[in-house]
């Protein structure tokens, strides 16, 4: 009987297919990029896939989050993705965690001997945390991002390539899909590139050493050679985001139940972006949008939990 992976085996060989079947990969973020990446890895026969995401599925996700359908709305992304992936490939193991990845639980969800971590997140804080954890435990990981028609990708291989902190010295506010939009072709391309690089890393088959940037609107493709940053803390075994008690500076005010999260944002630009998608109040030094009071350096959020507060900041501010 013909193998499920016969067409792939013709290209990579049966011995390499067995390596994929014996590999464990963690995917952090099961949104637009993460669902595409998870689907491709499951179809390729990666034997053990770990899914981690803190959010639930919304109607506007269906435009680009390819594993989900209308019946999934309102349900947790990680566990729903697991259900769909098990229907795609019943011969692999899939584990789902519906939780916010942080420095207290990362070692519980991502084994220290894992083969690879794939970043499909929407925020810089989690990427810095992944970077610290991966470098400390000598785990390769792949950074990915997509917004509008632009995308970026880089393999980070401990002791062989520059790390994430070499490129981005500190967290900065980023544009989000919620505020500036994204094409589903952008996120689908990121997933395809990420899985191609993931297979190269798992098979030790000359993965890229470049920072890759693509602009689909202009069909521009750039490969940038990045150098290690002198004094990079992570490269010098100083794991700020992994060891810090509260790297995001999150505070809860007992009197009001509100949360405060430190941010760094261009308030004038954020006003323009948010005004396109909803009503806001401008108080000069800050703006009120939904249940958030946003300053240039911090955000006050009325939320039921820290997890919910972080979801709102990632969705509308993009820290």
Image: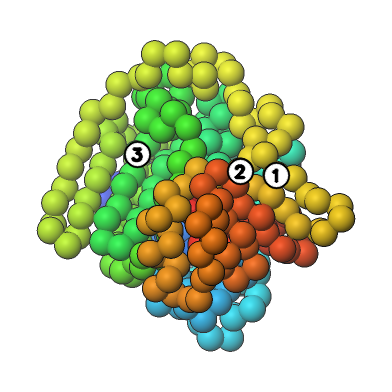
Q: Residue furthest bottom?
A: 71
Rendered residue at 40%/77% (across/down): 63
CA–CA distance in space, label 1 to label 3: 29 Å
Tell me if residue 133 comes above or below residue 110 in the rendering. above
Point out the tag, 1 or 3, that comes first from the N-terminus: 3
Q: Please, what secondary structure does the residue beneath circle 3 have?
A: strand
> Which is more toward the observer, 122 or 187?
122
Quadrant for residue 85, please give it.
Answer: bottom right
Rendering coords of residue 261 (x, y %): 64, 47
Q: Please, what secondary structure does the residue beneath circle 2 have?
A: strand
Q: Are marks 2 and 1 in contact (CB under 8 Å)?
A: yes
Tell me if residue 253 comes above or below residue 188 in the rendering. above
Q: Residue 154: which numbered mark, if any? A: 3
Q: Are marks 3 and 2 in contact (CB under 8 Å)?
A: no
Q: Mark 1 highlights which residue?
A: 250
CA–CA distance in space, label 2 to label 1: 7 Å
Judge depth for marks 3 and 2 and give the one in front. 2
Q: Is residue 215 visible?
A: yes
Q: Mark 2 highlights which residue?
A: 262
Rendering coords of residue 270 (x, y %): 43, 58
Rendered residue at 34%/39% (across/down): 154
Point out the tag, 2 or 1, that comes first from the N-terminus: 1
* Crowding at mark 1 (Cα within 10 Å: few <14, some 14-19, many 20+): some
Tell me if residue 146 comes above or below residue 65 in the rendering. above
Q: Residue furthest right?
A: 255
* Crowding at mark 3 (Cα within 10 Å: few <14, some 14-19, many 20+): many
Q: Residue 221: which numbered mark, if any? A: none
CA–CA distance in space, label 3 to label 2: 27 Å
């Amino acid at each position: 009987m013909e193998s499920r992976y016969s067409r792939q085996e013709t290209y990579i060989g049966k011995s390499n297919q067995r390596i994929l079947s014996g590999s464990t990969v963690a995917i952090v973020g099961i949104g637009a990029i993460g669902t595409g990446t998870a689907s491709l890895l499951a179809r390729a026969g990666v034997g053990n896939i770990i899914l981690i995401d803190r959010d639930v599925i919304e109607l506007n996700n269906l435009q680009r989050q390819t594993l989900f359908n209308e019946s999934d709305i309102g349900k947790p992304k990680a566990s729903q993705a697991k259900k769909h992936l098990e229907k795609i490939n019943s011969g692999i193991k899939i584990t789902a965690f519906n939780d916010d990845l942080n420095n207290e639980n990362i070692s519980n969800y991502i084994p220290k001997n894992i083969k690879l971590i794939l970043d499909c997140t929407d925020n810089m804080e989690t990427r810095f945390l992944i970077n610290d954890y991966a470098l400390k435990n000598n785990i390769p990981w792949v950074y990915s991002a997509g917004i509008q028609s632009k995308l970026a990708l880089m393999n980070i291989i401990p002791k062989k390539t520059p790390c994430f902190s070499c490129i981005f010295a500190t967290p900065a506010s980023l544009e989000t899909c919620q505020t500036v939009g994204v094409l589903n072709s952008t996120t689908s391309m990121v997933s395809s590139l990420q899985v191609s690089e993931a297979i190269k890393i798992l098979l030790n088959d000359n993965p890229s050493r470049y920072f890759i940037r693509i602009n689909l609107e202009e069909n521009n493709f750039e490969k940038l050679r990045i150098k290690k940053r002198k004094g990079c803390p992570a490269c010098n075994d100083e794991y700020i985001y992994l060891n810090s008690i509260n790297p995001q500076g999150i505070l809860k005010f007992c009197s009001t139940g509100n949360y405060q999260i430190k941010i760094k944002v261009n308030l004038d630009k954020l006003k323009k972006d948010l005004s396109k998608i909803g009503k806001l109040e401008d108080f000069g030094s800050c703006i009120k949008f939904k249940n958030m009071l946003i300053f240039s350096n911090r955000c006050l959020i009325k939320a039921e939990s820290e997890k919910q507060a972080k979801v709102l900041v990632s969705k509308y501010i993009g820290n």
